[in-house]
Image (cartoon, grey):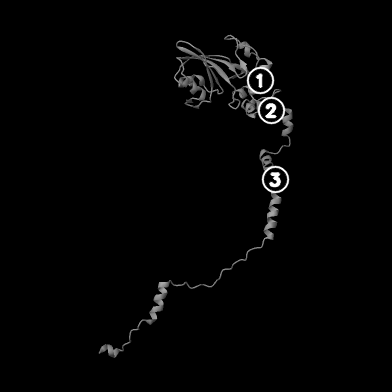
Amino acid sequence: MAALVAGAGRVYPVGRLDLKSTGLLLLTNDGALAAGLLHPRGAVTRVYHVKVDGTPSEEAITRLRRGVRLADGKTVPAHVRVLERLPTKTWLQVTVVEGRTHLVRRMCEAVGHRVDKLARVRFGPVALGTLPPGAWRDVTPRELAALRAAAGLRPGGGARHRHAERATRGPEDRDRDRDHPRQAERMVDRPPRRERAREGRVHPQATETMTAVASAMRAAAAACPKPPTRRRSTTKRTPKLPSATAEVASASPTCPKPSRRTKSQLRA
């Protein structure tokens, strides 16, 4: 392994294998390639040979194919087929497109079958083949082109999806780009970011369209006749009495008035 990574710079593992798992493991010094292969958008297939306890029923295999509910969510439907049936064990081939931790082991345990052995035999277009444990080889040009296509990268270099490039760029990369002569030329006489955002906030063509619409609306408003304004009267109006009060008021003058008595009559 030391001879493999010697002189390669920074090496990125594409996926991982735990201590109880064996099989194919891709290593690359291309960070964009590793990020593109591991990103869920690519849906790169992983093929495993799994040895489980017991004999899975057809219902258990159907559950694995349709998706199993785990603690971190339901799995994506997988391709499962039986390779070999032993007296107490069963070999399965499971193909998934997710890279969650211990995904295949948890899927098998969710349907009631513990995993004894697990080996990754294919990752995307690269197959393990007859490569013995502990050995390594370089990928062929055809395999590299297929890996770049699966990761969403152009054949000549560069990322189709910008997320793969951003995921692998660190502070040292940005500092190196800032010190580049061409980047330094771009920074000369460059307005601040806030002014650039203010200038590019509205497109010039959109501004002309908005001005034309505003002038047309003002012309249409000037051509339309204005409704007559209604002035309020300053004189106070006496409120009308309700009907019951009006009847009482109109009936009150007909009531007999009390007679006036003089002082002599009151004394007598």
Query: What kind of residue is marked 1?
Result: Ala
Indicate the secondary structure of the residue bearing disc 1: helix
- Residue position marked by numbered label 3 in the rendering: 206
**Viewer-nearest residue: 214 or 177:** 214
Quadrant for residue 267, please give it. Answer: bottom left
Does residue 236 sit above or below 84 in this rendering? below
Kindly report the distance in space between the C-alpha atoms of the residues bearing marks 1 and 3.
44 Å
Looking at the picture, does residue 233 appear above or below residue 2?
Answer: below
Q: In the figure, 129 relative to 217: above or below?
A: above
Query: Along the polypeptide, which appears first: circle 1 or circle 3?
Result: 1
Q: Nearer the viewer, mark 1 or mark 2?
A: 1
Q: Nearer the viewer, mark 1 or mark 3?
A: 1
Residue 195: x %, y % from top left: 68, 41
Q: Amino acid at mark 3?
A: Ala
The residue beneath circle 1 is 146
Q: In x, y percent, where is residue 133? A: 57, 9
**Callout 2: SS:** helix
Image quarter (top left, top right, bottom left or bottom right) of the C terminus? bottom left
Q: Tags 1 and 2 in contact by the CB under 8 Å rule?
A: no
x then y, percent, for residue 57: 46, 18
> Horizontal placement of 237 versus 32: left or right?
left
Can you identify the residue that label 2 sits on? 177
Mark 3, other Cα within 10 Å: few <14 / some 14–19 / many ≥20: few
Q: Is residue 191 left or right of residue 96?
A: right
> What amino acid is at disc 2?
Asp
Determine whether, in the image, residue 92 is placed left or right of residue 147: left
